[in-house]
Image (spheres, helix red, strand yellow):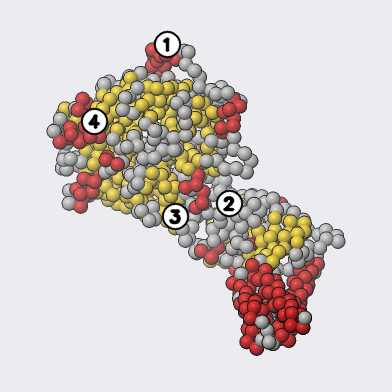
Amino acid sequence: MMQRVSRILMTVASLLLLLAFVFPLWRISLDAPQYPEGLGLRIWINTITGEKPHDLENINGLNHYIGMQKIVPDSIPELVYMPYIVAVMIFFGLLVVAFGKRKLLYSWVVVMILISLAGLADFYKWGYDYGHNLDTEHAAIKIPGMAYQPPVIGSKQILNFKAFSFPDVGGLAIVLSIGLGFAAIVIERREDKNQNG
Amino acid sequence: MKLFSKPWGAGTAVLVLLFLGLYLMGGCQSGQNSGVIGSGDAASKVYVAPGDYDEFYAFMSGGFSGNVTVHGLPSGRLLKTIPVFSQFPENGWGYSEETKAMLMTSDDFQPWDDAHHPELSQTDGVPDGRWLFINANNTPRVARIDLKTFETAEIIEIPNSGGNHASPFVTMNTEYVVASTRFSVPIPQRDVSIDSYKENFKGTITFIKVDPETGHMEVAFQILVPGYDYDLSHSGRGPSHGWSFFTCYNTEEAHTLLEINASQNDKDFIAAVNWKKAEEFIKQGKYKTMKTVYYNNRMDESTQTASSKKYTSVPVLYPKDVPGLIYYLPTPKSPHGVDVDPSGQYIIGGGKLATVIPVHSFDKMLKAIENEEFEKVIDGIPVLKYDAVIAGEVENPGLGPLHTEFDGKGYAYTSAFISSEVVKWKIGTWEVVDRIPTYYSIGHLMIPGGDSRKPWGKYLVALNKLTKDRYLPTGPELAHSAQLIDISGDKMRLLLDFPTMGEPHYAQGIAAELVKPNSVKYFKLEENNHPYAIKSEEEARVERKGREVHIYMSTIRTHFMPDNIEGIKVGDKVYWHITNLEQDWDIPHGFALKGMRTAELLIMPGQTRTIYWEPREVGVFPFYCTDFCSALHQEMQGYIRVSPRNSKIKISYNKR
């Protein structure tokens, strides 16, 4: 059976995931000289919004010059599944606490890591698609060999914009949640050593 | 004629005074420190680093331009021209269907005027940054500018008036803005001999009620007064809240060559009006309803379209019927400005031909009224005894004192037109403590909040009437000149010279933080209830209704939709309804059409503007965007085809 401490950690880890429903998971900021007021996107568990009202429309407006597809949150199926996946993982995490089985704990952490990696890969795929799959026939600005893919994490110069992409509160909560799950594993392993030694 | 606002036209009297002034002032003027501080020091005081903001907004009247200009202080930078009483082809103000109604008056459409005195709305006697009022002198009107959008929101006409000069000064909580006749006229207007001036010509003092929520204006009542020239005004505050004060000259009631004939009396008057009493008299029905015609034009925020309402009568109070409403305070000589100190206790007259600045005491005035210390009674208006109301006289105040503002630290600053200087004096002792020359011939002066209960006593702006050699010459017509003067220390110091547009008469200043946070960046498209607005390119269309053609057009970077239109015929009545779909800061689009005989349009993001066009010629005419909007701005263009009247070509256009 799991230790009391690691059960508390797992409770916190599960409930932390609730933050993903309240705060954006990821943020993309676009810096350019003529946008002193800022311009950016927020990726939420179930939608994509502008950093300010109308930012999404304005980014879509700018993107039409390079022939990029419009970002239409309703057309992205992942934004429909994601709330269910996270809800299931919260439930799963609380089951780990209730049953106190280490195997459940291990599998929770592994599944969380896999989901997160899959999410990042998916994010990369969408970014690649937006950045490369351009309507060159109607684009006003065509630069041979130029792609407009935003970074998954970090910053990159895209024409006049410097794009910054970093996890937001919701995304950090998931990372922390996995961290706490991992800490629970470490505590459990140490406990084993103590008992064996 | 206002003697000193157009001195170049006033002729010999001014010259005589000028020479007399130089003679009298000779000794005191020479040897005066010019007040210019080391140029490096001055530069650092007015330097606003790139990207930084000015500390104050300054609103300057445009005078004969009919506009208001917005400057930043201390830099003096020009930030915006706000069209008010004059058509402005640059953005279509007064030409577009939405704004034409703003310039309606009982004299029909009035596309120009002479705008004199900006006045900020006040709450508890302090500028609150909500609205700016300004008067039109020629066709008597008062406008209200909304400081969220820096656009004119309302213009009300003043009935029974000629030359609305003593206007639009506010009461302590903007309960009212006032108006009055500089040029007395037959009231009601009728065909009489000008020689019958004394018998037939009257003045009016008007109180315009301001709705505290919406700012909407309506004429509350008028007071019929003797036919003098009512010149300027300020309202009481603190103890004198409830009273408004108006200077008048030409108590001689001259009707020709006023520069001589209206300069005979040693004293003219400041009229003190008890408007709280007036409210009671109105409630008691002690007024007469006078038939007249005047317009109120208001911009509807939701449709962004102005409409005019015609009024046909006004309640008028006759001083004879309602004793206690109004008193005259004798004031030397041909007074121009009347200013109330921050405490509300002192009423200062700018007697432009006087050798002293008279300061009346509000308390003494009340006592004199109570004790009936009257010199005489004119048309039911008691004239109080000068000695009974005077608190003090500022000696040697410069020649031609006009206007006084305050620093909130116990000092007053009076502009002296003839001796071309600002004179600083102490309230209470009435001594002159400092003076500084201005370049040249100062009219109004302005301290941010300087006519309120709490002035920001840091800078003073001198608004000069003559420019001469201050800037690189630009032919006979020169910009007016203003000087920024540091009044934070004991000695006034000249910091900056900057040109102003039109002829700023008065100006107002306010701390930027009271206005800046409320400034609208763009209009929200979802709140645009213009009847011809479209919310997306898919709704763009062209509809014919007989001879009328309505073009529902959109703009977004970087195209018009539609941008090819055919089926228009010579003599059609074409309405271009253009909605700017942008929802981004500082992305207006322009619209210009070859053959448009009125104006171009500037359409702000989220806004709809309509311009009317009657094509006269057959052909294909280009239109394009006049406000550089994106890298492909030059591509933002289109064509409209005009066919002969008898053509069978149907309306067609490209679609999204």
Q: Which residue is mark 4?
A: B329
> Answer yes or no: do the residues labelled 2 and 3 have beta carbons within 8 Å?
no
Q: Which residue is mark 1?
A: B27
For the residues carrying marks 4 and 2, which lies nearer the camera in this image? Answer: 4
Q: For the residue labelled by badge 1, is the local secondary structure a helix, a strand or a loop?
A: helix
Task: Please provide percent x and percent y for residue B349.
Answer: 32, 29
Q: For the residue labelled by badge 4, is the local secondary structure a helix, a strand or a loop?
A: strand
Q: Earlier in the sequence, mark 3 or mark 1?
A: 1
Q: Which residue is mark 3?
A: B299
> Answer yes or no: do the residues labelled 1 and 2 have beta carbons within 8 Å?
no
Q: Residues within 10 Å of mark 4 (few under 14, many from 20)?
A: many
Task: Please provide percent x and percent y for residue B484.
Answer: 51, 30
Q: Quadrant of residue B395?
A: top left
Chain of the residue that carries numbered disc 4 in the rendered image:
B
Disc 4 marks a residue whose amino acid type is Leu
Q: Residues within 10 Å of mark 1 (few under 14, many from 20)?
A: few
Disc 1 marks a residue whose amino acid type is Gly
B270 left or right of B215 in image: left
Q: Earlier in the sequence, mark 1 or mark 2?
A: 1
- Residues at discs 1 and 2 both on one chain: yes
Disc 3 marks a residue whose amino acid type is Met
What whole-number distance in Å separates the C-alpha atoms at marks 1 and 2? 56 Å
Task: Please provide percent x and percent y for residue B638.
Answer: 68, 57
